[in-house]
Amino acid sequence: MHDLGPLLLALAAILVATKVLGDLAQRYGQPAVLGELIAGVLLGGSVLGIVHANDEVLKAFAELGVLILLFEIGLHTEVRSLRRVGTQATTVALVGVVLPFAGGFFGARAMGFSTVQSLVAGAALTATSIGISARVLRDIGQLDTPEGQIVLGAAVLDDLIGLVILSVVSTVVAGAAITVGGVALTTGLALGFVVAAVVVGSVAVPPLFRFVERLRTSGALGLIALAFALVLATIAEASGSAMIVGALAAGLVLHGTPQRVDIERSVTQLGYFFVPIFFAVVGASVDLGALADRQSLMVGGLLTVIAVIGKLATGWSIRNFKGNRWLIGVAMIPRGEVGLIFAQVGLTTGAIAAGEFGAIMLMVVATTLITPPWLGRVVRRSAAPEPDLSGDGLDDLVGGRRPTPRATQAVVRKHGD
Amino acid sequence: MHDLGPLLLALAAILVATKVLGDLAQRYGQPAVLGELIAGVLLGGSVLGIVHANDEVLKAFAELGVLILLFEIGLHTEVRSLRRVGTQATTVALVGVVLPFAGGFFGARAMGFSTVQSLVAGAALTATSIGISARVLRDIGQLDTPEGQIVLGAAVLDDLIGLVILSVVSTVVAGAAITVGGVALTTGLALGFVVAAVVVGSVAVPPLFRFVERLRTSGALGLIALAFALVLATIAEASGSAMIVGALAAGLVLHGTPQRVDIERSVTQLGYFFVPIFFAVVGASVDLGALADRQSLMVGGLLTVIAVIGKLATGWSIRNFKGNRWLIGVAMIPRGEVGLIFAQVGLTTGAIAAGEFGAIMLMVVATTLITPPWLGRVVRRSAAPEPDLSGDGLDDLVGGRRPTPRATQAVVRKHGD
């Protein structure tokens, strides 16, 4: 037997800290995910050193967590309502990629960075963290609004655009030439996968799950649905798209089946365990030490301002929209793990140095941590009904109407804890 | 991002195969766990090669699975009813260690093996696999009977005795001297931990969980209870006892709290996902190739006969017992992962060669696979009510009475899938 002790203690610490700090966040009117991120920062290498974000096993748990989160969100979402906001989501995605990229590139150039360094900085600003955006929107009960659907669609699209940019920037950093055909192929594969998965899935899945429903083994329906999401995530990555997009597509496909409510209930239960591990590991991967020197702070501060303004503007990029533009703009801000991936690729390929890495990390931390409280404030200002901050979305599922916080709690107790 | 694809596909394959083969097993009147073990053998290196039992991440999932299983079983078990059968469980454990050890040692000597080789063979026969025994008993609805409680207590005890034997045999194999004081210390620590955990836990845990119950985060109660089990498992191992014993002790402690039903429901849901991974990985660690040569088959066959008779006899070792002695004897037979650990330690230290390793593996596979159908037959013969083979134990929890199979299915659907 190898030594499993440290891993079990790390898992136990994550479970306790995310649930306790998540509760604290809610008591102060913040979404639970803010508490989970802070729990990760505290448990990570910068403070307590209990959770090692590079541990292979913890990373696998975290990846499974974000896949389950996106699968849950897909299960909860109608393809039709996403299609209805398609044009608006595309506009928000494109503006939200072009503005931060241009701002980051020219801002970095103006500060004296090289062209390649400026390309990495610009690229790191492009992609909204779909996991964090979607989770915050769900925590504050805004995922099913038109604004929420636009942000979800736009976040998926700019994640795909971000992948294309990542491959282009990697090519440039490696010193190779970019071909228009290559870029077009990458783009086509990434976008084509989602369409193909939803179309093929809608035909093949219902008969499959009529068979699965007949299995008498405990939890079979929900877990085979999860297996379907894992397979689609793997295919998505293999075809040049992102894993989380595959998991989301699996949810969208299963949304239309008669077994949806049962699947959703089962996956939600697993999510209570896995999803906070993802946010804690994102938090633990923050290296507070890299933010310490003055130059990183200054460059990082400027990148953060560009990152916030570039995405905030997306709220005003769509025409004839009667909803809350602040809600869209603020929800697009968090960069989370996607920005970190860009920074890490840049650092390991030698395209950027430790100082610029620290600056990008500061931008990621700042955009991730300001979003939850800011969004909460936007919603409260627009005098929406009391938001459900518990982060499970079960209220819509069970009652059909919005229960009072107390009733929500009772429902969650019955099905959850 | 590192390549997560193969792991996700392995997980998906495990989820689908265990649920489908578990269902098939039930349809043929067998416990679901038999289907899960066979699913593992098929997915493992010997046949399809999709699941690698040595993968660090899969091993962690599997370990978590067996910890959750033992935690569930502890939650379900009253310390009082374990204490009531204490003397009988101790007798069964001692007889079940001494007979197979003596049989294995002298049998191996008679076949011409060296003293050290024979010691390893005897040691590998001693410990019942508590995970497999408890799971089969639960699958066939016999865990709460006096026989089930005796087997549970005896399996825990012989696991602890097995750990002491493992440390003694390792010392002998390494050529060092054994001290009586050292053995006594190991034994004292291993047994003392359980007693200390239950006593201290019963005092400290209720106020702690009155606080936890007030948290509003989704799933907080069940997941913090799980964190408690993981911490106790780590302490158990650090103090020379076994991790699974720590998880069981955590369940026993929480059984007495008012939050027990909520915790049990939440942990059961997680168990649907994690527990089959454990049995699939146990199945996948079987190397069918090692069973191929004739000498391994002969030695393995003899060890299997000794293993079966040695444990079967335990049913008749207790006096004045009016229950089903066959139920106890057969339930003690499976060696599972504990026997494999002995064989692997023996192989890596050079105490035994590949041929003897294959023979021990054959004994482990045979005792593990014959137990589920044999136990099912023992129960049917004694004209017990229709057993619930679904392996979740939710029937006792929800209804209070034993529902018909159809009703059980409906209940499981509602809470589970």
Image: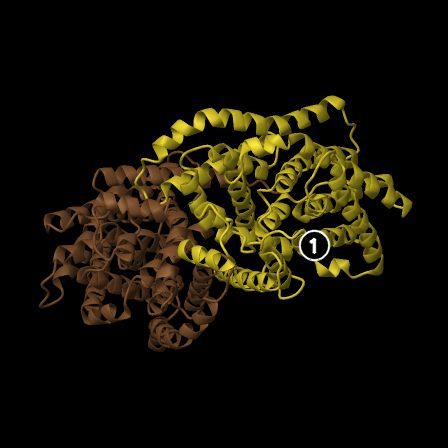
Chain colours: A brown, B yellow
Above or below: residue A11 compared with residue B413: above
Query: Which of the 4 image quadrants contains residue A413?
Result: top left
Residue extending farthest top: B181
Residue at the disc numbered 1: B374
Q: Residue A58's spot in the image, x, y percent?
A: 46, 47
In the image, taking residue A31 as reference, residue A379 lies left or right, namely: left
Mark 1 element type? helix
Q: Nearer the viewer, residue A248 or B32?
A: B32
In the image, taking residue B82 as reference, residue B374 lies left or right, namely: right
Q: Nearer the viewer, residue A11 or A264?
A: A264
For disc 1, the chain is B
How many residues crowd mark 1 within 10 Å: few (<14), some (14–19), many (20+)?
A: some
Q: Residue A236's spot in the image, x, y percent?
A: 41, 68
- Can the viewer see residue A299 in this picture? no
The quarter of the picture where the N terminus of chain A appears is: top right
Q: Residue A139's spot in the image, x, y percent?
A: 26, 50
Above or below: residue A273 compared with residue B12: above
- Can the viewer see residue A331 in this picture? yes
Residue at coordinates 83% horizontally, 42% vertically from top-left?
B103
Residue at coordinates 41% horizontally, 56% vertically from top-left?
A349
The quarter of the picture where the C terminus of chain A appears is: top left
Above or below: residue A63 compared with residue A202: above
Q: Amino acid at mark 1?
A: Trp
Q: Nearer the viewer, residue A66 or A92?
A: A66
Q: Residue A239's spot in the image, x, y percent?
A: 42, 71
